[in-house]
Image (cartoon, rainbow, N blue to C red):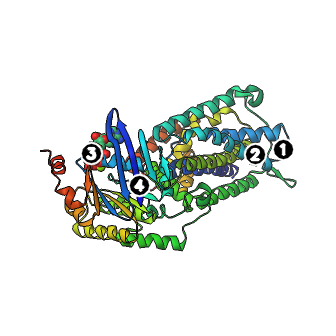
Amino acid sequence: MEYFLHLAILFSIFAILAISLQLIVGYTGLLSVAHAGFYGIGAYIVALLLKNAGMNFFPALLLGALGSMLVAFLIGIVLSRFRDDYYALGSLGFGVIAFSILLNWQELTRGPLGIPGIPRPELFGFEFSSNLSYLLLSFILLGAVYAFSRFLTLSSFGRALQAIREDEEALSVFGYRTSWFKLAVFVIGAGMAGIAGGLFASYITYIDPGSFNVTESIFILSLIILGGLGSLRGAVVGALVLILLPEALRFVGFTPDIAAQMRQVVYGVLLIVLMLYRPQGLMGKYKL
Amino acid sequence: MNAITTERLRKTFGGVAAVDDLSIVIQKGKIIGIIGPNGSGKTTLTNVLTGIHRMDGGVVVVGKKERTRIKSCEVFGLGLTRTFQNVRVFEQVSVLDNVLIAITKKGVLGSLFERASAAQIQNADAVLARVGLTEKRDALAAELSYGQRKLLEIARALATDAEIILFDEPYAGLFPEMVKRVSGIMQELKAEGKTVILIEHDMALIRELCDHVLVMDAGKLLAEGTPEAVLSNPSVIEAYLGV
Ligand SMILES: Nc1ncnc2c1ncn2[C@@H]1O[C@H](COP(=O)(O)OP(=O)(O)OP(=O)(O)O)[C@@H](O)[C@H]1O
Ligand SMILES: [Mg+2]
């Protein structure tokens, strides 16, 4: 049961990451591999505020989200001028820089040693120390992120994002300053990733830079490609499948010493098979 | 009254002048034809006027100001819109949404808090009915035939309610009954007092619709006048037939 709760919490965190990246990649067509960077910024801000400043989790989470958004704004001003492969490369550059700052700014982040002993959230004297209560908190945040994303995608803003994905230049002729839209969705997505990061840090109680490298960005990307681009539900399904998959593999009977490697192999094979037979993903509407 | 004037407008691609010091006047409230052989710079002119390409020289007067630079996102505000010769509809978006794009709010904040209203949707449906795409309203633009996409381009332009509309070969790939429908739309636009710029290779259509015709050749203005005058002009015939 505890293990099930653990998986459900991880699922919520990754579903938030997938939904937020879906807005950027699936809706707007901006191939960003910087997402783990914002996830990491949120995680570190929350971890440091909880541990070193003794702040309450909830204002810290808000600051974590705002911190991610601020960095995304600064990066996005430059990045939003690009499109297509240039955008992907630019975001890769940022992802690498973010990771190496987390790794090398040792006075602040303790580098590869990571930050242990991050406290759990507390609200009016109630501590979210049990996994059940933490799951509840995660689900509430996931629900809020989902609802807000749905609100966005159904708005005129969401329609413009999709038109940017299809033909940014043609859209601009109809009066849209497309780079502002790209900047806005990038900042919004980063804020959500920051929330996922804070949730992760306080749950695991120990973070190190390894959880926020470019490989992690690609993992998040694979969640939405698997689930289907351009679909919020797809993002959630993608997170569910890729979080539960290793557990399914456990029953297949790989021994623990090869299970981790086999998981990577099976992820890879699964993605390849999916792209061959269902390129639009499980729930998606279109191909990348 | 003039809708658009250009003075020594210039656009070069790697040394080749696609629009070569072109000075033209587009009168308001008329249907103005632009003809010329392939590669004579008609589309490039359209692209420069709508900010797709940056002009390399010259001045464009549209609205009240003289401009030496037009940004594509400003074009809508100038009351100018266009269709694309190489159809550029938003493929993986519904036909209705393709039209709504032209109608709903254009700013980041405004659009965030706006959902298409019943009135806006009604407006979009009316435009779709006008081009005969009502049945395709909920399909993805990608599912349309080539001719239907051309019609969707027209619908999207109409939905902006712009004062000046540039049609870059709107008839290409249309069935005869659709050709009639589009011609009807051109005449309605003129009756509404709008300015229509029609780039077209079919001289029968040019004769039927246009009040005034500009002939381009190698980025320059070769001739202009009424359709009759221009189409009987020996140098125009020569440019077209390459005699
Ligand atoms: N983006 C571009 N890059 C380089 N050259 C271009 C570009 N666009 C147009 N040209 C060149 O500019 C010249 C004018 O082309 P343009 O498309 O404006 O002609 P057009 O009159 O529209 O022809 P058509 O009747 O075939 O549509 C051609 O020589 C073309 O090759
Ligand atoms: Mg052309």
- Residue plotted at (33% across, 49% down): B43
Residue drawn at x 31%, y 49% is B42
Q: Amino acid at mark 2?
A: Leu
Nearest to N terminus: mark 3 or mark 4: 4
Q: Amino acid at mark 4?
A: Ile
Residue at the left extreme?
B243
**Label 2 environment density (alpha carbons within 10 Å; few <14, some 14–19, many ≥20):** many
- Crowdedness of circle 1 by 10 Å Cα count: few (<14), some, many (20+)? some
Left or right: residue B107 versus residue A202 is left
First along the sequence among labels 2 and 1: 1
Q: Which residue is mark 2?
A: A63
Query: Label 1 near label 4: C-beta < 8 Å?
Result: no
Badge nearest the viewer, 3 or 1 = 3
The residue at which mark 1 appears reads as A55
Asked whether the beta carbons under mark 2 and mark 1 sit within 8 Å of each other, the answer is: yes
Q: Nearer the viewer, residue A241 or A198?
A: A198
The numbered mark at residue B40 is 3
Q: Tag 4, which chain?
A: B
Q: Residue under mark 3: which chain is it in?
A: B
Q: Chain of mark 2?
A: A
**Residue on which the image places disc 4:** B4
Q: Amino acid at mark 1?
A: Met
Residue B184 visible in the picture: yes
Local secondary structure at mark 3: loop
Pointers 3 and 1 within a single chain: no
